Amino acid sequence: MARVTVEDCIEKVTNRFELVMLASQRARQLSSGAAETVERDNDKAPVIALREIAGSTVELNELEDSLIRGMQKQIFFEDDFTEDMEVKIEPRIAADVAENSAADDEGGGEDGE
């Protein structure tokens, strides 16, 4: 396969947006040192990623899972916490928070109010 076209890849991934996302994820993996599954032929990572997808030499489900894991963020809001949830913070940070709380209770903040 000398040249990769979108048509070669669309046979494997029918949604063009998904194809772009998967190819960019694979290109990032290749840039980070992942093993290539096709010959490099002096090509850059995005081209190799597309060649791998077109040639079915990379597992698309694993690539999709990797993409999803990389984009996931876990955000907690104050309303989400319950009394039985345990929040772990480093002892040094906990001491600083306690110290600042005590100073605020006494009315002695850093600005001298």
Image (cartoon, rainbow, N blue to C red):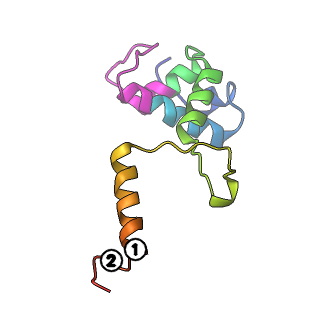
Q: Which mark is residue 27?
A: none
- Furthest-bottom residue in view? 113
Amino acid type assigned to the residue bearing label 1 in the image: Asp
Please identify the quarter of the rendering in which residue 80 is found: bottom right
| Count of numbered circles on the image | 2
**Horizontal side, residue 91 vs residue 81: left or right:** left
Whether the residues at callouts 1 and 2 have beta carbons within 8 Å, the answer is yes
Q: Quadrant of residue 55?
A: top right
Camera-side residue of 108 and 111: 108
Q: Position of residue 90 (x, y in %)?
A: 39, 43
96 or 28: nearer the viewer? 96
Residue 113 in the image: above or below residue 58: below
Q: Per the image, is 40 magenta?
A: yes
Give the left or right position of residue 8, taking residue 98 as reference.
right
Front-most of residues 22 and 47: 22
Q: Residue at x 28, y 76 (%)?
A: 110
Instruction: Give SS at disc 1.
Output: helix
**In the rendered structure, which segment of residues is drawn in magenta?**
28-49
Residue 3 location in percent, x, y? 48, 25
> Which element type, helix, strand or loop, lies under badge 2?
loop
Q: Amino acid at mark 2?
A: Gly
Disc 2 marks which residue? Answer: 109
Residue positioned 35% across, 61% down in the render: 99
Classify residue 16 by image quadrant.
top right
What numbered label is drawn on residue 104? 1
Mark 2: give few (<14), some (14-19) or many (20+) Cα within 10 Å: few
Between the C-alphas of marks 1 and 2, the distance is 6 Å
